[in-house]
Amino acid sequence: MSQATAKLEDGSHPVCCPHTEHSVPLFWPFAAAIEMQERGLRLFQDNLKFLQEVERIQVPPPPEWATPNRIRLDMDTMRLRDFLPKGEQGGGYPVVIDAPYAGHSATITDFDKGQSLVEALQAAGLRHVLVTDWKSATRDMRDYDIDKYLTELNAVIDDLGGVVHLVGLCQGGWMSAMLAARFPNKVRTLVLAGAPIDTDAGNGPIKQMAHKLPLQFYEEMVAAGDGLMRGSFMLAGWKNMHPDKQYVEKYIDLYQHIEDKDYIGHTERFERWYENPLDLPGRYYLQAIDDLFKNNRFARGEFIGLGRKLNLKDIKIPVYLLAGDRDDITTKEQVFNAEKLLGTPPDLIRKKLVPGGHIGLFMGSNILRDVWPEIGKWIGSYN
């Protein structure tokens, strides 16, 4: 699609300077609608048809892990990566980082030396760290639902001895909270970082668009992806409607969020992560949109997970809530409102608001240096 193709009816181009983060594919439909508003929404819907014919484009090699690791389990939904250094014995309960399953690789948790959540937690004394490396969905996975992912996350915990510390990032946060609500005795501590627990809280742009756009809007995108919410499909669509931003300015803009100090080298590494999006099962994606972001059923105690209604009051373990003051993907209210929904006593809940946006919570060098070691020591105090 050329830039000319993306003109509006009045001959102008859609807005090319987005105000919201577009680094999380799960939210690209929201972000597109937010930026284009009413006049561009029809264009976006029309371009879905065009994108089905978009030619295959070259992409960088897949992203790499910065820290040595081994695959402990290879499951339908994920590869469980174990970062325990060879020859070491892990003391205390294992720490499982539940990476975001929102369209990008779990290497966001181990992006680069000096910019790695895995590295930060290990330096804080938590040597046995593992990461859920979620797989890109294939056509055979298109009917996987949230229960499928909870089942395999539960199997991970059983394989690790039955009790773990869970660190849930973004979409991995609500998944971790669901697991803790369903199996309260299997989670020692729970960290929710940039995790949308109460999606009706605050007045962020994602909340507004979740309620504004009909479910049919998202169903059409899944249908166009043959039952999948295709990461590459959404990425191509967004880039071609904002060519200046996405082909020229995007790295500068995104790196402001992750506080990069080595532009050239990190740009190459970032491109390998950003330009290799994951496909999501259509059923999982639509369930997340409808049940969580439209109807807030988890926060209301109405979501059924693995055969039971999940109640956040059943979570009574120590919980750490982390939010960014400029996060417009998951606003601080969506994270901090969990405090009054949980069964955890107030003296066992820690909250921290840090400067920055969404992906900076997991990749920002300052936050990894100054905040996550503190969280790591907090986790370690419950070993």
Image: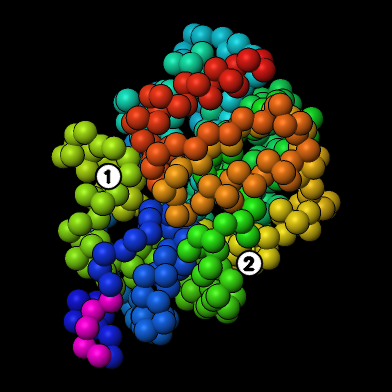
- Give the label on residue 294, or none: 2
Residue furthest to the right = 308
Residue drawn at x 20%, y 61% is: 247
- Highlighted magenta segment, given as a residue range: 10-14
| Residue 285 percent location from the top left of the image | 57, 62
Residue drawn at x 59%, y 25% is: 95
Q: Which residue is mark 1?
A: 255
Residue drawn at x 34%, y 31% is: 365
| Residue 104 percent location from the top left of the image | 42, 50
Q: Nearer the viewer, residue 338 or 119?
A: 338
Determine whether 139 is above or below 48 in the image: above
Determine whether 29 is above or below 105 in the image: below
Horizontal placement of 252 versus 20: left or right? left
> Which is the main secondary structure of the residues drawn in magenta?
loop
Which amino acid, by three-letter code, is at mark 2? Lys
Give SS at disc 1: helix
Q: Can residue 210 be seen at all in this image of the molecule?
A: yes
Q: What quarter of the picture does the C terminus occupy?
A: top right
State which tag comes first along the sequence, 2 or 1. 1
| Residue 46 percent location from the top left of the image | 39, 84
Horizontal placement of 217 versus 314: left or right? left
